[in-house]
Image: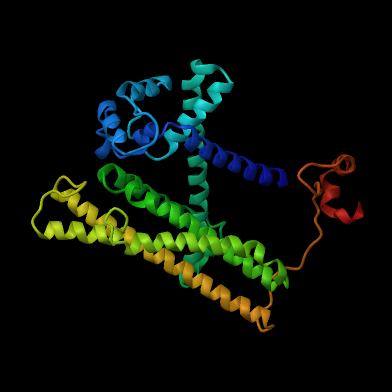
Amino acid sequence: MRLIGYGGMMTESFVAIMALITASILNQHLYFAINAPGAQTGRTAETAATYVNGLGLSGPPITAAEITDAATSVGEESIVSRTGGAPTLAFGMAQVLSSVFGGSGLKAFWYHFAIMFEALFILTTLDAGTRVARFMLSDGLSNLGGPLRRLHDPSWKVGAWVCSVIVVAAWGSILLMGVTDPLGGINTLFPLFGIANQLLAAIALTVVTVVVIKMGLLKWAWIPGIPLLWDLIVTLTASWQKIFSGDPKLGYWTQHFQYRDALSAGKTSFGAAKDPDQLHAVIRNTFIQGTLSIIFATVVLIVVAAAVVMAIRSIRGRGRPLAVETPLPSRIFGPSRLFATPVEKEVQKQWDALGESATRSVGTSAH
């Protein structure tokens, strides 16, 4: 398990490094041609070239032929406005990998290999998220008592099925929004993902910091405390800007009221909205974005405030004792580090030779 845990972290770090390399090596004009919305690029190579060349980017301007050739090199008809990040990462990985393995002849292969890799990564994340959300839903509903208390038992299949259906329907509704509402769906929730993800990290770091303090290791609290402080400063500043900025391109509520005023003035189109239905969609979506941003930031502030109170009480000796279960000797042998030493490999052979029945009744202290 330790090998899987450390290996997973190393692989995740590799993906992050590849993303940074991709963003660094791609032509700036091509990068914006891929990631700019279709309403700005026009979704053709000619209009995309005109748009990105007018952004004032460094380097020579890009031509429509160069954009088309870039798409052809990876086996695509077009890469204009392929937003979401996955095509950009795949294109950069294809450039790197094809320069090492196979040359330009395998560039299309590496591009689609990277797309498949990202799709599998997203699917496994979605699977794990669905399982966690289902557990949280069943556990939360069981606290209401009454007949719902039975949901606390994870072996109750009916309850697990019902909660699974609810969770799948919840994220499935996002897919439905993306199909039925061009201005909603992922366009509504994706801007919140970055902030929500970092606020979740802030909550995790807050819990770790409090646990370290309650364990009597105050002198080591700076290890999770410094990343926590940096995370809070950056993420809450971004939340403040998204909520209160007067720039409609940045602030959710400014954009919300701008589109609402346009609708009240009798306009049938405004900004990205081309008809009254899209005007209503933007008003609804910006309301969702602004409201969720406030909720996310408020929840994090409440958690941090409660953590500060708990930490101060613990330092003064008046905090509640740390809830730690009585340690039990392990009945499974494994290396103490990522890779086993020669001695540990020999002990592992002896351990495996004992058989399953012996390992159930004998702890590792006997060895």
Residue 31 place in picture, x, y as percent: 40, 34
Q: Nearer the viewer, residue 350 or 114?
A: 114
Q: Is residue 365 above or below residue 26?
A: below
User: Is residue 115 at all visible to an observer of this figure?
Assistant: no
Query: What is the x, y in percent for residue 75?
Result: 41, 21
Q: Residue at x 67, y 71 (%)?
A: 213
Residue visible at 59% across and 60% down in the picture = 227
Q: Is residue 109 left or right of residue 266?
A: right
**Would residue 63 appear left or right of 101 to someone viewing this image?**
left
Q: Position of residue 165 (x, y in %)?
A: 42, 51
Front one among 58 and 119: 58
Residue at x-position 83% and y-position 49% = 359
Please identify the quarter of the rendering in which residue 69 is found: top left
Which quarter of the figure has residue 283? bottom left
**107 and 114: which is toward the camera:** 107
The colour scheme of the drawn protein is rainbow
Where's residue 203, x and y in %?
54, 63
Q: Residue at x 46, y 60 (%)?
A: 235
Q: Is residue 315 above or below residue 259?
A: below
Name, please, the residue furthest toward the left.
Answer: 266
Q: Total label count?
A: 0
219 relative to 105 in the view: left or right: right
Question: Is residue 50 in sight in this rendering?
Answer: yes
